[in-house]
Image (cartoon, rainbow, N blue to C red):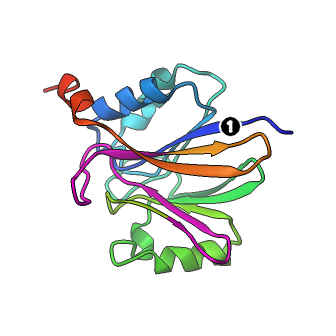
Amino acid sequence: MGKSMKILIVSDTHRRDANLKAVIEKTAPFDMMIHLGDTEGSEEHFREWVKNEKCAIYVVRGNNDFFSMSEREKEISIGKYRAFLTHGHMYGVSLGPEGIEDEARSRKVNIVMYGHTHKPYLEYLNDGLVVLNPGSLSYPRQDGRKPSYALMEIDRDGEAHFTICYVEPEEKKKDWSF
């Protein structure tokens, strides 16, 4: 029996951070936060917003992160899993996930996480690969255009569970900041 873990996964906030702050508050406490790019500079505030010194925070650079010092892509361990984190624009994700799936296989990871399309996507492939895009908290582009994020939970047996979550409109109303 291992320790369970909770991971918040977000992307494409583009410096419009009201929903991100609300989601951090609502889902806390979590053990790890992953941002898959296009923060446009907000990553410097993540530590203070998360308010948990023990929380690991990983950020990769997106195509709009011109001055970011974040790495372009990263491989990390989450429990028994290897995850490949990238914004996705260099793998043609706007046309479909095939390019990023091939890259993930060549890296021999279990999970690939990406952003860029602003559309949530979760697929469990036959070879065991999990392909995840949390969508965008600021500029959603899928049908219905609801801001979205993902939660990954590792249960006590070490198994991963993924959920795509949506920010409901009433949360959005009280968070309008001009």
Q: Nearer the viewer, residue 144 or 11?
A: 144
What residue is pinned by disc 1?
5
> What amino acid type is highlighted by mark number 1?
Met
**Residue shown at the point (63%, 69%) measured from the top left:** 129
Image quadrant where residue 25 sits: top left
Q: Which residues are magenta?
A: 123-150
Looking at the picture, does residue 135 appear above or below residue 4? Answer: below
Position in image of residue 153 (x %, y %): 62, 43
Image quadrant where residue 96 sits: bottom left
Magenta stretch, main secondary structure class: loop
Q: Count of labels shown?
A: 1
Image quadrant containing the N terminus = top right
Position in image of residue 155 (x %, y %): 72, 42
> Does 142 lie within the magenta span?
yes
Q: Nearer the viewer, residue 174 or 64?
A: 174
**Residue shown at the point (31%, 57%) measured from the top left:** 118
Left or right of 102 on screen, residue 172? left
